[in-house]
Image (cartoon, rainbow, N blue to C red):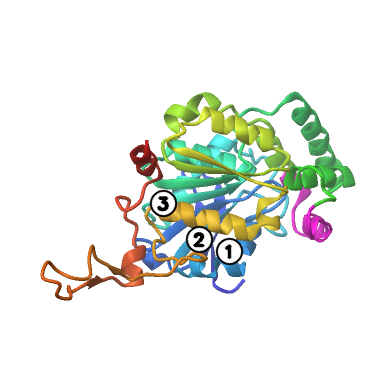
Amino acid sequence: MSGIEQMEVVAASGRTFTVHVQGDLSKTDSRAVFLTVHDMGSNHSSWVEFVAHPVMKETKDRSVFIHVDIPGQEDGAKDLPNDFVFPTMQMIAEDLIAVVDHLKVKLVIGLGEGAGANILARFGMAYPDRCMGLVLIHCTSTTAGVMEHFKDKIISWKLNNVGMHPTAEQYLIFHKFGHQLDSAENKERLIKEYQDRLQSKINPKNLRKYVEAFLKRSDLSGKLESKLSVETLLVTGAKASHVHTVHTMHQSCNKQKASLLKIDDVGDVLAECPEKFAQSLQLFSKGLGVLTSLPLSGVDRQRTFSGSSTDEEARPRRQRTMSMEEYDTPNLRRFSFSNTQAAAN
C-alpha cells in the first residue's frame, strides 16, 4: 500500500514483529503517534482500512500510525516453525516496547481491538511513561469463561487439523460481529469480505496459536484500578459478543481514568460505524492535548488565541497566532479528561 513503510523489529525476547508505519517518523515529537494492535482473524490491514476512511483524512495527515502484526498473522504468512513458542498476551505487550524504542518514539496512544486491545491494556500498565492514552475496542480483562474455553478449544482443533473450517469461520465471525448478525446495515457484505479475507490471507495454523494465547490470557481485573493509570477509553458495540465483559472491565477500572462508550445497534465498531468511532477518537485525542487544531463537525476552526481582542484602553491588542503544527504539538497541560472531571466535581 502506498505511503506505508514496512519493517521488521526484533524484540529483546528474540521475537520478530512486522511493523507498518504510516506518516513521517521525523515528526513524532510534534504529531500524535498511534500504536495499533489487531484482533484475532485479522492483521494490520484492519487498522489501515479504518485510517483510510475519508472521516480520518485530517487525523491521518496530522499523525503517525504504527501498525504491529502479531507473529504469524501477516498476509500470506508461512507456518510458524514447529519449535516456535507462541508468546502469551503479557509477553507480546512487553515486546511492544522494542517497537517504540526502535522507532525512537517517546509517547504513543494505543489503539487495540479484541485480543489486540487486551495486549495494549497490558502495555499501558507495564509502560505508563511511554503511553499517553489507550482506546480499546471490545477489550476484556477477565479470563476465558467455561463456554468460551469450550468453543475456542473446538475452533483451535479445527484450525490446526482442517484449515479454515466453516465452523471456525462462524465462531470468528461471531467474535468479530457479535449478536443479531442479520440485522445491521451492510452486514451481509461485511461478513462476506471478512470470510474472503480469512480464506485467502490468514494462515489458519498460525491463527490457532493466537486464538490459544487469547484463550489462556491471565486475569487483569484485580490490577486495573491501581495499575492502569493512563487515560483510557473503552469502546463496545451494543451487539458485540464481548459487550458484558467490557462492562465488567470498566467496573474494575479507576473511573477517574477510564470512560466507557457503548454504540447502539452495532456489533463490529470499526466496520459498521467508523464515523462515530473516528469522532470519539478525535475527541479523546484532544483531551490528551494532541490534534487540538483538528476541526470537528459543527465547530469552527480558530487559529488565534487571546483572552481579549482589545487592551484596557480599547485599542486592538496584538494577537499571538500559532501554526497548526505548533498547536498540534502534544501539550499535556492543555487538556486532561481527569482534570476536567475533577474541576466539575
Q: Secondary structure at mark 2?
A: strand
Q: Are marks 3 and 1 in contact (CB under 8 Å)?
A: no
Which quarter of the figure is the N terminus placed in?
Answer: bottom right
* Coordinates of residue 24 in the picture (x, y in percent): 43, 69
* Kind of residue indicated by mark 2: Phe
Which mark is first along the chain, 2 or 1? 1
- Residue 92 makes an appearance in the image: no
- Relative to residue 335, is residue 228 depicted above or below? above
* Coordinates of residue 10 in the picture (x, y in percent): 50, 51
Pointer 3: residues within 10 angstroms few (<14), some, or many (20+)? many
Q: Which residue is mark 1?
A: 51
Which mark is first along the chain, 3 or 2? 2
Q: Is residue 194 magenta?
A: yes
Q: Secondary structure at mark 3?
A: helix
- Start-end of magenta stretch: 184-207
Q: Which residue is mark 2?
A: 65
Which quarter of the figure is the C terminus placed in?
Answer: top left
Majority secondary structure in the magenta region? helix
- Relative to residue 261, is residue 54 depicted above or below? below
Between the residue at mark 3 and the residue at mark 1, the CA separation in whole angstroms equals 20 Å
* Coordinates of residue 15 in the picture (x, y in percent): 55, 46
Residue 287: mark: 3
Which mark is first along the chain, 1 or 3? 1
Q: Are marks 1 and 2 in contact (CB under 8 Å)?
A: yes
Between the residue at mark 1 and the residue at mark 2, the CA separation in whole angstroms equals 9 Å
Question: Which of 131 and 237 lies nearest the eye of the viewer?
Answer: 237
Question: Which of 98 and 130 lies nearest the eye of the viewer?
Answer: 130
> Foreground mark, 3 or 1?
3
The answer to whether 136 appears left or right of 216 in the picture is: left
* Kind of residue indicated by mark 1: Val
Between the residue at mark 2 and the residue at mark 3, the CA separation in whole angstroms equals 19 Å
